Image (cartoon, rainbow, N blue to C red):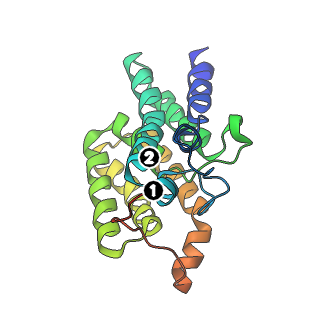
Amino acid sequence: MLSILLPLFAYLFGSISSAVIVCWAMRLPDPRTSGSNNPGATNVLRLGGKQAALITLCGDALKGWLPVVAASALNEPAALIALVGLGAFVGHLYPLFFGFKGGKGVATAAGVLVGLSVSVAAWLVAAWLAVALLFRYSSLAALCAAGLAPLLVLWLLPETSYVVMSLAIAGLLFWRHRENIRRLATGKESKINFTRRRK
């Protein structure tokens, strides 16, 4: 029964949109129809500044972290924990409560990996930050981290289920960033403004 309930719970928990809730609570524009139209932390940064973006980032990461930690605390097998992590991630991408129109999943994927291995997550956060600070493209940083994730999992957490899960997450991240990839290729992708202040 838990093999069904835990991934389902993870999916439903992942379906809660931190960006929409934060923007509603802080009286900001709806991130689904403003800015880049993506309900994620980067778009919230554009719409409301660093505080709103940080809250959104933490909320999205929590959606990935909590289900994985809960499944691990129950001493579930690695295959089920991997399904739970993937369920939370898919919930963020295709949320039941928001018409299956969610974000791109970077923070939630990070939360899943923190729940599995702090070492893997730390390397990926370092990679994301390095690329983001150097090139100022959030999407490029996300893609680089996604591509690196399966290799780090294979190196630091060599469990077949986790490697397969990380490959699936990486593939979905690249799919969700396909428009960003096109804009990066044509030089039309917007950059992160780390100095923006809310007016």
Element carrying mark 1? helix
Visible in this render: residue 28?
yes
**Who is closer to the viewer here, 115 or 196?**
196
The residue lying toward the viewer, choosing from 186 and 112, is 186
The residue carrying mark 1 is 45
Give the residue displayed 41% in from the left and 33% down from the top. 65
Tell me the kind of residue under disc 2.
Answer: Ala
Taking 121 as reference, is 182 above or below it? below
Quarter containing the C terminus:
bottom left
Residue 27: image tag: none
Q: Position of residue 4 (x, y in %)?
A: 63, 22
Image location (x, y in percent) of residue 176: 60, 59
Residue sitting farthest toward the front: 199
Residue at x 36%, y 56% (from the top left corner): 151
Circles 2 and 1: CB atoms closer than 8 Å: yes
Quadrant of the image containing the N terminus: top right
Image-based side of 13 in relation to 158, left or right:
right
- Answer with left or right where residue 98 lies relative to residue 59: right
Residue plotted at (37% across, 18% down): 73
Q: CA distance from mark 2 to mark 1?
A: 7 Å
Q: Earlier in the sequence, mark 2 or mark 1?
A: 1
Q: Which mark is residue 52?
A: 2
The answer to whether any part of residue 163 appears in the image is no
Which secondary structure lies at badge 2? Answer: helix
